[in-house]
Structures are given as structure tokens and as C-alpha cells.
Amino acid sequence: MARPKPTLSVIRSPIAIDEIQGIWLWNAEHYSPAHADAYVRYLEQSIDHLDRRYATGKTVSVRPDLQYVVIRRKSKGHGHVAVYRVRDRVVELLHVFHTAEDWEAKLGK
């Protein structure tokens, strides 16, 4: 039987925290504060699950030292890309981009 992956700590960079706050603001303005609360809660829970699912991420092509996962509520449509790295038993969330952004170009700069 395969051994389970160890649980790591998940921390958010100041930039990622700002990006998540921006996601909340956009959703509150375009939908409602209640919608924004629910969506950001879903996003945060998905990010928190990286404590055990960190190995499911894909390598960022322009930055092989980083990984990413796509987070969406529905199988189709837009969502967000969580970009992170794993170091010293910590998953460090670096960025949260919208899937419509050219996020790899931003990381390649």
C-alpha cells in the first residue's frame, strides 16, 4: 500500500493575500458581497488543500521551480490559477491569477 504524502504547512505571500483581496472586491462589485464571500471561501479551501495535494500541481513552463493548480467551481469556464513552491515542508502560495490572464508571461519576467 502506498504511503500517504506528508502534510505540509500552507502559507500565503503578501502578494497572494493582496490578489485574493482583489478577487473578493471584483466579485463583490460584479455580483454581491455574499457571492464574493462564498467564492473566496471556496478558493481559500482549495488553497488550504495544497497541504496534502501539493504534488498534484503542474510545473510552470517558464519557471520550473514553481508549480500551479487550476481552481474552478465548474469543469468549464474561468477560474483561478494558484502558483506555489514547496520548500522545507512548506507550501508557499506566491500568486493567484485569473485563468484569462497571461499569467505565465507575468511569471517569466
Image: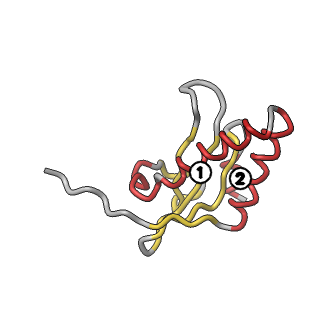
Which residue type does callout 1 highlight?
Glu
- Find numbered disc 1 in the image and state the secondary structure of the residue it sits on: helix
Lateral position of residue 100 relative to residue 30, left or right? left
Tell me which numbered mark, 1 or 2, is placed earlier along the sequence: 2
Which residue type does callout 2 highlight?
Ile
Image marks 1 and 2: residues in contact by CB distance under 8 Å: yes
- Residue positioned most to the right: 29
* Position in image of residue 54 (x %, y %): 43, 55
> In the displayed structure, would residue 38 be above or below residue 45?
above
Lateral position of residue 81 relative to residue 91, left or right? right
Residue closest to the eye, 56 or 33: 33
- Residue positioned most to the top: 76
> In the displayed structure, would residue 25 be above or below residue 7?
above
Q: Which residue is pictured at 59% across the width and 51% down the height?
A: 44
Task: Mark 2: give few (<14), some (14-19) or many (20+) Cα within 10 Å.
Answer: some
* Position in image of residue 59 (x %, y %): 49, 52
> In the displayed structure, would residue 13 be above or below residue 102?
below
Residue closest to the eye, 11 or 34: 34
| Res 20 label | 2
Which residue lies under the disc numbered 1? 44
Q: Residue 35 is drawn in which quadrant?
A: top right
Q: Which residue is pictured at 58% across the width and 24% down the height?
A: 76
- Find numbered disc 2 in the image and state the secondary structure of the residue it sits on: helix
| Res 2 label | none
Q: Residue 107 is drawn in which quadrant?
A: bottom right
Task: Mark 1: give few (<14), some (14-19) or many (20+) Cα within 10 Å.
Answer: few
